[in-house]
Amino acid sequence: MQELIEFMVKSIVSDKDAVSVTSSQEDRFTLYNVTVASNDLGGVIGKGGKIAEAIRTIAKSSSSRERIRIKFASK
């Protein structure tokens, strides 16, 4: 799952080296923290959060058993 999220985010941003995806296990779900360069954060989130929501939807649909959450931040 981490590789899928990283692939999707890297295809959007201009600074591919600044992309970092880490995961941590919470109570009932896995949290993926996505960090990008500050000038790429707006492009990853998109207008009205549409791109971020699309990334979440694709990740959740490809994960049949695992409950996930994705959080976006800048460096």
Image: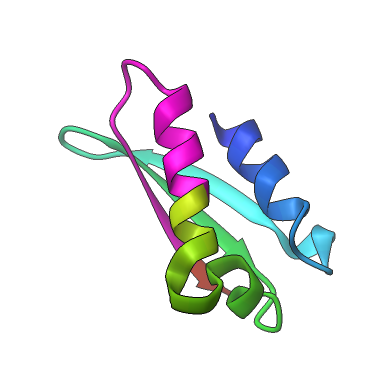
First to last magenta residue range = 55-72
Q: Residue at x 42, y 28 (%)?
A: 61
How far across and down, in percent of the image, does residue 14 sit? Answer: 83, 69
Residue farthest to the left? Answer: 27
Whether residue 75 is visible, yes or no, is no
How far across and down, in percent of the image, does residue 2 sit? Answer: 57, 35
In the image shown, does 40 or 24 lie closer to the viewer?
Answer: 40
Horizontal side, residue 75 vs residue 13: left or right: left
Q: Residue at x 52, y 77 (%)?
A: 47
In the image shown, does 72 or 22 lie closer to the viewer?
Answer: 72
Whether residue 73 is visible, yes or no, is yes
* In the image, residue 20 above or below residue 6: below
How far across and down, in percent of the image, does residue 29 sit? Answer: 25, 35
* In the image, residue 30 above or below residue 49: above
Snapshot colouring: rainbow
Q: Residue at x 63, y 34 (%)?
A: 4
Q: Quadrant of residue 74?
A: bottom right
Horizontal side, residue 24 vs residue 50: left or right: left
How far across and down, in percent of the image, does residue 49 sit? Answer: 45, 70
Q: Quadrant of residue 13?
A: bottom right
In the image shown, does 24 or 52 lie closer to the viewer?
Answer: 52
Quarter of the picture holding the C terminus: bottom right
Horizontal side, residue 18 vs residue 9: left or right: right
